[in-house]
Image (tube, helix red, strand yellow):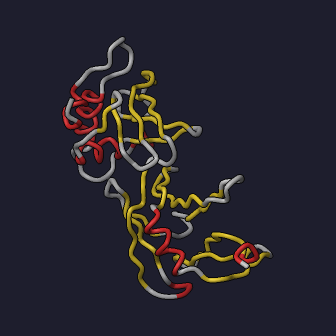
Amino acid sequence: MAPQDNVTRTDRGGGAPSADSLAASARKASKGGGLPPVHLWNPPFCGDIDMRIARDGTWFYLGTPIGRAPLVRLFSTILKREDGKYFLVTPVEKVGITVEDAPFVAVDFTVTGTGRDQVLRFETNVGDFAEAGPEHPICVVRDPETGEPSPYVMIRAGLEALIDRKSFYRMIDLCTHEDHDGTRWFGIWSANTFFPVIPSAQLA
């Protein structure tokens, strides 16, 4: 089945709505333009649906990639995180979905200014933008066994983006060594905020 057609299928077994009905409700709620006010919606939980966001940002429905970028964008606007779980929310329904890592991927960024005054503005795979700073912090999590870094930036309302590899390498080129919480760190400035990446001693 072609990826662009799979959302027209209806989940078997009743209970949760289909992706098609969710999309219809989301379109109706988004007619005013901008992001829907999902934080104001508290509809009844309708169960989980077979929708998954892979670590690379690909959205799947019933095991098949969703091939229509505008539809992925639409779903992303009604995404909500509560108690560490992810849901698609409309004014009348709320369904659980699976997110393998972060719901978004930061695929690029621009830089304005220099030094402490520089500002990194990230763009995600679904068309969101966020300027790294106090409200949109950068966080680098290291695998305890391999030490492999996983960098993230907060996009909105508890929803993070995994910073892709090419963007992370560009980010590293902008990093400096600074004292932070009593320790020397290698990290990056954005909007007068320092975000630590790795202790300087570990780079020796």
The number of discs equals 0
Question: In the current view of this chain or complex, which residue is farthest to the top?
Answer: 13
Seen at 47% across and 34% down, the residue is: 98
| Residue 183 x %, y % | 78, 75
Extreme-bottom residue of the structure: 114
Q: Is residue 126 left or right of residue 48?
A: left
Task: Give coordinates of residue 81: x percent, y percent.
Answer: 50, 41
Residue 53: percent from left, percent from top:
42, 41
Q: Is residue 58 above or below residue 62?
A: below
Residue at 73% from the left image edge and 79% from the top image edge: 204
Q: Nearer the viewer, residue 203 or 6?
A: 203
Percent across and percent down for residue 34 are 29, 53
At a point 39% along the width and 32% down the height, the residue shown is 51
What residue appears at the point 53 percent right and 64 percent down from the top-left corner? 135
Residue 49 sits in quarter: top left
Relative height, residue 99 to residue 43 (above, below): below
61 over 136 or under it: above or below:
above
Residue 39, by quadrant, is top left
127 or 64, nearer to the observer: 64
The N terminus sits in image quarter: top left
Whether residue 201 sits left or right of residue 156 in the image: it is right
- Which quadrant would residue 27 be assigned to in this image? top left
Residue 196 sits above or below residue 10 on the image: below
